[in-house]
Amino acid sequence: MSAGDKLFGRLLNRHPPPPLETLQAPSMPGVGLQMHLDADGRVLHLTGPLRHVLAQQVPGARAPHLLDFLLPHCSLVVEGTPSDWQGQALDLDFYTLSGQTLHLRGWVQPLAEAWLLQLLDIGDLLLERRQSQVREQCQLLALQIGEQLRLCSLTRLPEMLTEQLQCLAQRFHIPCIALALLDEQEQGWQIHQHFSGFDAPQLWQTGQRLGTGLDSLNGSAPQHLNPLEHPRLQGIFGNAEGFVVPYHDAQGVAAWLLCGCYPAQQRAPDVSERDWLQFAAALAGPLLERSREHRHHLQMERLESLQALLGTGWWEMFSDRAEVQLAPSLASALNLASERLALNDWLDQVHPADREELRSRLQDLLDEGTPLLLCVRSYRPDAALPPSWYRLQGQALGVGRHRRLVGFMLDISDIKNQEQHAAAAHARLDNLIASSPAVIYVQRYVEGALQPTFFSDSLLPLLGWTLDDCATTALVERVHPEDRDRYFERTRQLLREGSVSARYRLRDSRGDYHWLLDEAKLLRDDLGLPVEAVGLWLDVTEATLAAEQVKQSEERYRILVEDSPAMICRYRPDLSLSFGNRPLAAYLECTPEQLPGLNLGNWMSAQQRESFIQRLARLSPEFPVSTAEINLQLPGREHAWWVWSDRGVFDEHGQLLEIQAVGRDNTEVRRSQQQLTQSAKMATLGEMATGLAHEINQPLNVMRMAIINVLKRLGNGDVQVDYLTDKLNRIDAQVQRAARVVDHMRVFGRRSEIEQQPFNPAQAIEGTLSLLAEGMRGKGVDLRISETGFEVQVRGYVDQLEQVLINLMVNARDALLSKRETNPEFKPWIAVYAERDQQWVRLWVEDNGGGIDPRLLERIFEPFFTTKPVGVGTGLGLSVSYGIVENMGGKLSVRNSTEGARFCIELPVVQVD
Ligand code: ADP
């Protein structure tokens, strides 16, 4: 330590005053000020260079007191007399001539009888001390500010910044203070936060844009802004004086502290530039740091969540330790307990199939710095799920010892799965196309023409062609000559309308033709100009031929149905027609098209319709067919008889849906049958003429006898009224009898009714007897008629049954009479009797004429079979009778009894309500 240092140390009160013996040292007349004082403190003598600047308070006094040179507050320091001050350092402020205070420090020491006050100028030292105090305070303040801003919560940060600005403003009396930061786009400065004193002008607002004017300043030191010198900044400071302090970070000026309406040098002369820079740093530093941190935090957060979302994460490898660090999201995706693990453990997570490749690639990355890009599968031996796919990328950062290996792992299972699906689908499609009967082709559009450029592999198996065989001209040659027009039209339509579907035949390599269905579409570019046609050929040969055959067979069927002479139709259970062919339409006098909807019942009587429907009701899936002769009233015709076959069509529940029917007109047959019956009847009548003559003669004879007797009595004049009445009544009875016979003949001679009626067969027996009985008896034939009077009904025509009975009785009579011719003793008889049960009624006609030769039994019902001489027998009697009985639903049969023939008419009983 030099003497000077010791001195300053003492002067600065850092050390106790020197011991008295050292104070005995000679005075230092060359420096400072020496005052010789008397015992009271009066100044005796002054030496030293500073004596010239002193100003005496009471000038001219002879022996001024020390106090006369001192500022009033120093009187406390020099209380008493110099002997009291010994051993003390005295800090004294002197008046000077210039008016400025002179700060001196000194001490008293005895000198002979007087005292020497030795003083040195400590003005500079004091200034320095004050400044260092200010600096210390500023530093403290800056520290506090920085601390507050660093420690407060993020939400309170803006508020805290305002508070700190306010604190600065108040401390240094700054009217307007603000902190400006670069705006978000970093294109200019922006007021981030500001504070204005109570009565200060509002120079700024938060968020106010300041432009780039501040950039023109030298950003290394605080600067006073004079509006005249910085016209670009006038606006910012409202034409008032200003003071700006920059804050630097690594990139340069990052913030400005603005003080408005503030002449800093005057207001805060002791605050150094460094202090201002500190304040700016204390405000802006933590603020920027925290906002950077916050941004960083957000970014990290974003990154983390993105990594989690993508199933990705970073990894870093420490080659020296063979260890790997993984991002937390990645570690959890891989189900790892720790984020840091040995390289081998990490490799164990990779499927054995990919493991060695990854290891080698990592080695390349480590040794050569070759970037790593690999897709690997994760390995979970115990998991049932398929492995996840990861894309692993890595690169080396830095060189030498500081080389770091970093990268990321991205879960690409989705993409891989899709790729695999797509590849499988593609393969399937390729396979399908190659093995399908379809050929997919592309034709390129060149100046209005379509040139084949691609055919799928199925071309060869289908047609035996290669692409070369399909050049435009070659293709046309392979089109069937009959189909070429179609082929050209197909191309024109494709170009015109953009799509087409056509069929034509193509010749394969063996010379066989294939029917192809060609479906094509024209693809156009953005301008709508044709680019190419894409289409497919489908081999439809079989389908086309089959369709052709179906068409032909349908046509044949149609012709068969249409042109059939039979009536063919389909109708619903309510008898409404859904289809009918031409013959049916012709009968019903309309066209086949008009038939659907018409009701067959329209041409039937109510009764016919009812029995028709009853017959349909008996159809069932087991017995779906029924045939009957039906009778209709057709337009313009009397009656039509159709032999009608129905076949029911049923649904799965056995419900009748529809009836298909075939009919044949039987009217002519029916009519000739009727004519036959009629002529047979006439023949019968003819036969009966003899019997009839007798039948009518008998009453005539009775009447004649009665009239003769009456006339005789009249001649005698012996006529009584009673007698006369009796005779006339007898005549009347005989007239009635004859009239009955004639009446019956008339009825019998008529044609049968069209419709069958229920009647009692006894009626027919009665009618027969009324015609034949007299004649038979007249010929000596004994008639044995049993009681047949039971109430039973059969359906048919009473006259026809009568005709049958007449035939049987006449045949019996003939047999009897011819037998009697050979044997006059013979007693002929005919028995007629009946019996019935629930279902049948049987009428028997029996004779004792010897019967029929058994060899002839088979044939007697044949038409025209007779054993009688020509002109006598017709051979129709039994045949017609057989038809009549059958038509009534019954049966005519014959047997030989012991004495003769026994005929049986068997008829179904009709239940009449
Ligand atoms: P036709 O009486 O005109 O000969 P039919 O058909 O009535 O025709 O009779 C056929 C034949 O059957 C007769 O010719 C006769 O030979 C025989 N026949 C019919 N009825 C009798 C009967 N009751 N006894 C014997 N023969 C009979």
Image: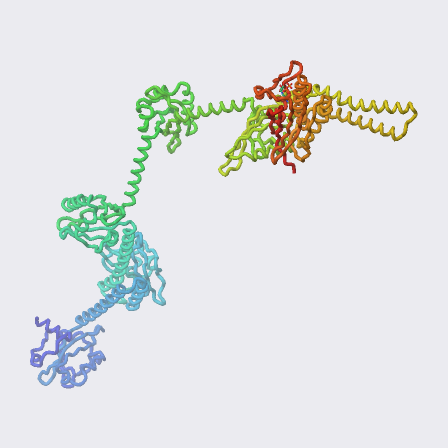
Residue 894, position as x, y percentages in the image = 60, 25
Q: Quadrant of the N terminus?
A: bottom left
Q: Residue at x 16, y 73 (%)?
A: 122
Q: Is residue 35 left or right of residue 666?
A: left
Q: Quadrant of the C terminus?
A: top right
Please indicate, yes or no, whether residue 584 appears anywhere in the rendered image: yes
Quadrant containing ligand 1? top right
Res 841 → quadrant: top right
The answer to whether residue 70 is above or below residue 632 is: below
State the residue in front, 207 or 894. Answer: 894
Residue 907, position as x, y percentages in the image = 62, 30
Q: Residue furthest top?
A: 870
Q: Residue at x 50, y 39 (%)?
A: 653
Residue 304, position as x, y percentages in the image = 27, 53
Residue 457, position as x, y percentages in the image = 31, 28
Please indicate, yes or no, whether residue 440 appears anywhere in the rendered image: no
State the residue in front, 245 or 340. Answer: 340
State the residue in front, 681 or 533. Answer: 681
Q: Residue furthest front?
A: 825
Q: Residue at x 10, y 85 (%)?
A: 113
